[in-house]
Image (tube, rainbow, N blue to C red):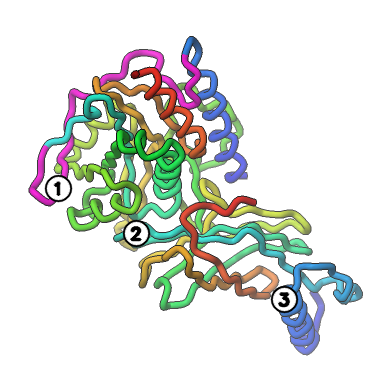
């Protein structure tokens, strides 16, 4: 029963996403109906050379894929990140080189500086490991994207339960979300969207 | 079930023989003893486990299970050299902690939160292929001892409500195999 429900929701969200692109564009993902500027918040980025605030904005002429997730996630996160990796393979090396990836961990307590960059290196040569230094920092970024997450710890067992919105967001070089990929969207569809977005940019 | 312990043991022996046979050959079931109506056969297809990302502590395995009789998958395990623990999990919408009958909850563009939860069992209605796949049910491996590397394989043991067990060799892959 539960299983059925989840499928129905995913299905309807995909259907919705398909209708979202009314107008001239034929993007497969969901196109936000109003401008969604995400460049006004930053999240702490961990790099070899130290930590810096990362602003959600692609480099000139590039696209940035942003995902909110956590590394203890065995199912949704690797499924989506692997699909992004496949999509990049599909569009060819030249275009793929212009696709950047940023993941914000919603579980900063466990996803440390040691772990998150290594995790992302499995999915992309270029990546930004974003580890919020406070809950406010995370919530402010989520608010811009309209993403959400919750981490609860069972006091008795120590078991950590993480909930997160499983959408991937594609941000352009103006810091605007140009398309959203709901969970379950296939790599082929992501590849089509990336190609179209680069065409529109040209 | 009014069987004596002896009969159950015999039944168990038949069941394990059948499992051994099906493991070697996916072809016809002509040789199956049709007089033993309660002997379950389990067909496992499309099994795979995703390559675990570097530094990841968890992994997931997927497969499609068909049982010849009404049964349920009640437990999963992997070798201690692979992971410390394995459980049956499912992804659900966070708001789905109780049954929801409406399918119109997607009021706006945004997905709700999805959470993973352990399930006691997965029902296997007779003859119905039940898929464990991304976004639905999966076998979650926790505290991986070694990373799951593409090109290798792991052995997963399935335990059914009937008491039968089945071991499945699961190849590790970067992407889901095309069916």
For marks 2 and 1, give the one nearer the viewer: 1
In this picture, residue A19 sits left or right of residue B81: right
The residue labelled by disc 2 is A159
For mark 1, does the 10 Å Cα neighbourhood hold few (<14), some (14 to 19), or many (20 or more) residues?
some
Residue B117 colored magenta?
no
Q: Is residue B37 visible?
A: yes
Do the residues under discs 1 and 3 have CB atoms within 8 angstroms?
A: no
The numbered dot on residue B24 is 3
The numbered dot on residue A47 is 1
In this picture, residue A72 sits left or right of residue B139: left
Q: Residue at x 55, y 60 (%)?
A: B48
Quarter holding residue A95 = top left
| Vertical relation: B149 (above or below) A140 | below
Do the residues under discs 2 and 1 have CB atoms within 8 angstroms?
A: no
Do the residues under discs 3 and 2 have CB atoms within 8 angstroms?
A: no
> Residue B151, how many percent across, how many down?
48, 66
For mark 3, does the 10 Å Cα neighbourhood hold few (<14), some (14 to 19), or many (20 or more) residues?
few
Q: Chain of mark 3?
A: B
Closer to us: A178 or B107: A178
Q: Chain of mark 2?
A: A
Residues in magenta?
Answer: A25-52
């Amino acid at each position: 029963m539960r299983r059925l429900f989840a499928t129905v929701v995913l299905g309807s969200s995909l259907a919705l996403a398909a209708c979202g692109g009314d107008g001239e564009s034929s993007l497969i993902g969901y196109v936000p109906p109003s401008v969604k500027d995400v460049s006004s918040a930053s999240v702490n980025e961990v790099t070899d050379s130290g930590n810096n605030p990362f602003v959600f904005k692609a480099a000139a002429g590039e696209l940035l894929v942003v995902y909110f997730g956590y590394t203890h996630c065995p199912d949704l996160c690797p499924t989506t990140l692997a699909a992004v990796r496949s999509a990049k393979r599909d569009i060819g090396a030249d275009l793929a080189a212009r696709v950047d990836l940023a993941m914000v961990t919603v579980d900063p307590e466990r996803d440390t500086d040691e772990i998150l960059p290594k995790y992302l290196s499995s999915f992309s040569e270029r990546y930004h490991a974003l580890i919020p230094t406070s809950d406010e920092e995370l919530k402010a970024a989520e608010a811009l994207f309209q993403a959400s997450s919750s981490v609860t710890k069972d006091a008795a067992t120590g078991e950590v339960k993480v909930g997160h919105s499983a959408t991937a967001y594609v941000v352009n070089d103006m810091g605007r979300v140009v398309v959203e990929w709901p969970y379950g969207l296939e790599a082929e569809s992501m590849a089509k969207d990336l190609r179209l977005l680069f065409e529109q940019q040209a | 079930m009014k069987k004596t312990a002896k009969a159950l043991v015999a039944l168990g022996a038949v069941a394990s023989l059948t499992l051994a046979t099906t493991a070697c050959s996916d072809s016809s079931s002509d040789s199956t003893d049709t007089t033993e109506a309660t002997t379950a056969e389990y067909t496992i297809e499309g099994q795979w486990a995703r390559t675990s990302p570097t530094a990841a502590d968890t992994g997931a395995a997927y497969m499609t299970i068909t049982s010849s009789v009404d049964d349920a998958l009640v437990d999963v395990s992997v070798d201690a050299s692979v992971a410390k623990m394995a459980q049956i999990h499912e992804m659900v919408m966070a708001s789905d902690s109780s049954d929801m009958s409406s399918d119109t909850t997607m009021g706006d563009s945004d997905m709700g939160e999805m959470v993973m939860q352990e399930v006691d069992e997965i029902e296997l209605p007779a003859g119905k292929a039940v898929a464990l796949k991304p976004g639905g049910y999966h076998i979650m491996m926790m505290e991986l001892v070694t990373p799951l590397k593409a090109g290798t394989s792991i052995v997963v043991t399935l335990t059914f409500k009937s008491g039968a067990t089945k071991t499945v060799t699961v190849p590790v892959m970067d992407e889901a195999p095309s069916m």
